[in-house]
Image: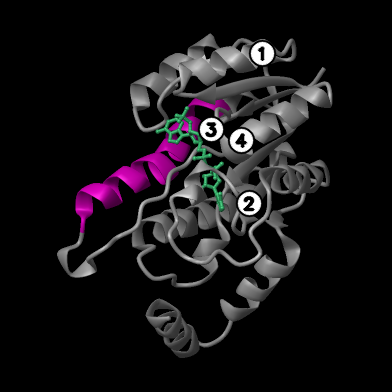
């Protein structure tokens, strides 16, 4: 039986991935802070759990000490999103909160759990297609996810000798608690089931870049390759509409 550790497995994409892998006869180590949901997940015979906050380095280290088995796959999915309402009065506390969870938390999880990934195994980092384009108010979220994209690409190069396949996962809009807070139009939003299914399929193929849904991420990826002046103009127009 293969083992996958998933952070952010108490809600949304991570929870659905945990249920999917458990159903596919993997042993899942589901992680999160919400102990109630972790207890529910433990009712599944293929799921064990670890409770820790990825933004508290000591908690990550202590949790990793409890993990006995080697990992076939490590999915660093936990993350948060907050928007900047008034950038002139730059909210550095909020920026630090988002970067602490999305980027530094990922770094702490890499330090603690990557040594447990078997040679020939897999690592997936949860980015976002938001980092393809300069979305209004997304300074903290977009910057953290752009950094994750770079991190994934460089890890893919340096883990190649150990045959550890590294995948960057870049979803578009997915219906979860994270997007339920959004008060703007979310084109081509997909269900958490569809997103998780496509992510699982992409990871099974050991793809470098797993994008879902295909059409939305393709269009956004194209727009993100156009001149910066055009992206700036378009983002301004979107912000005004
Ligand atoms: N939904 C989308 O449209 C979308 C699009 C692109 C990328 N993503 C990315 O996908 C990932 C999952 O998002 P989601 O939409 O599924 O959101 P979600 O439903 O809000 O789930 C977020 C998960 O992350 C965990 N988490 C957050 N902060 C944590 C912390 N400090 N320590 C430990 N766990 C923490 C939460 O667990 P606890 O509350 O139990 O701690 C929860 O399980 C995120 O990285 C997000 O940026 C989402």
SS category of the residue bearing label 1: loop
* Picture residue at 74% right of the left edge, 14% below the top: 46
Find out whether residue 97 is within the magenta segment: yes
In this orientation, does residue 73 appear? no
| Crowd band around label 3 with a 10 angstrom C-alpha radius: few (<14), some (14–19), many (20+) | many
Instruction: Identify the residue under disc 4.
Output: 14
Screen quadrant of the C terminus: bottom left
Residue 188 position, x and y percent, is 66, 64
> Which mark sits nearer the N-terminus, 1 or 4?
4
Work out whether mark 3 precedes mark 4 in sequence or the reverse, and give the earlier one: 3
Residue 87 can be seen, yes or no: yes
Image quadrant of residue 85?
A: bottom left
Q: Magenta region's main secondary structure?
A: helix
Q: How far apart are marks 3 and 2 (CA)?
A: 16 Å
Q: In this view, does 150 lie above or below 158?
A: below
Report the mark closest to the observer, 3 or 1: 3
CA distance for labels 3 and 4 = 5 Å
Residue nearest the viewer, comparing 109 with 226 = 226
């Amino acid at each position: 039986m293969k083992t996958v550790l998933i952070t952010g497995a108490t809600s949304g994409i991570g929870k659905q991935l945990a249920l999917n892998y458990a159903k596919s006869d993997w042993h899942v180590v589901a992680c999160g802070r919400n102990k109630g949901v972790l207890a529910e997940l433990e009712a599944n015979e293929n799921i064990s759990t670890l409770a820790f906050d990825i933004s508290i380095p000591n908690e990550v280290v202590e949790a990793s000490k409890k993990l006995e088995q080697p990992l076939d796959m490590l999915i660093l999915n936990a993350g948060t999103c907050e928007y900047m309402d008034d950038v002139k009065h730059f909210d550095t506390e909020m920026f630090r909160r988002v970067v602490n969870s999305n980027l530094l938390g990922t770094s702490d999880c890499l330090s603690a759990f990557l040594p447990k990934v078997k040679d020939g195994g897999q690592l997936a980092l949860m980015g976002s297609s938001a980092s393809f384009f300069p979305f209004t108010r997304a300074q903290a979220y977009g910057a953290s996810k752009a950094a994750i994209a770079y991190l994934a690409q460089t890890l893919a190069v340096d883990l190649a000798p150990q045959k550890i396949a590294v995948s960057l996962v870049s979803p578009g809009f997915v219906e979860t608690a994270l997007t339920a807070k959004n008060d703007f139009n979310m084109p081509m939003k997909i269900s958490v089931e569809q997103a998780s299914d496509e992510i699982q399929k992409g990871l099974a193929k050991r793809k470098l870049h797993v994008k879902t849904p295909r059409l939305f991420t393709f269009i956004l990826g194209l727009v993100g390759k156009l001149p910066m002046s055009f992206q700036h103009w378009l983002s301004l127009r979107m912000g005004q509409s």
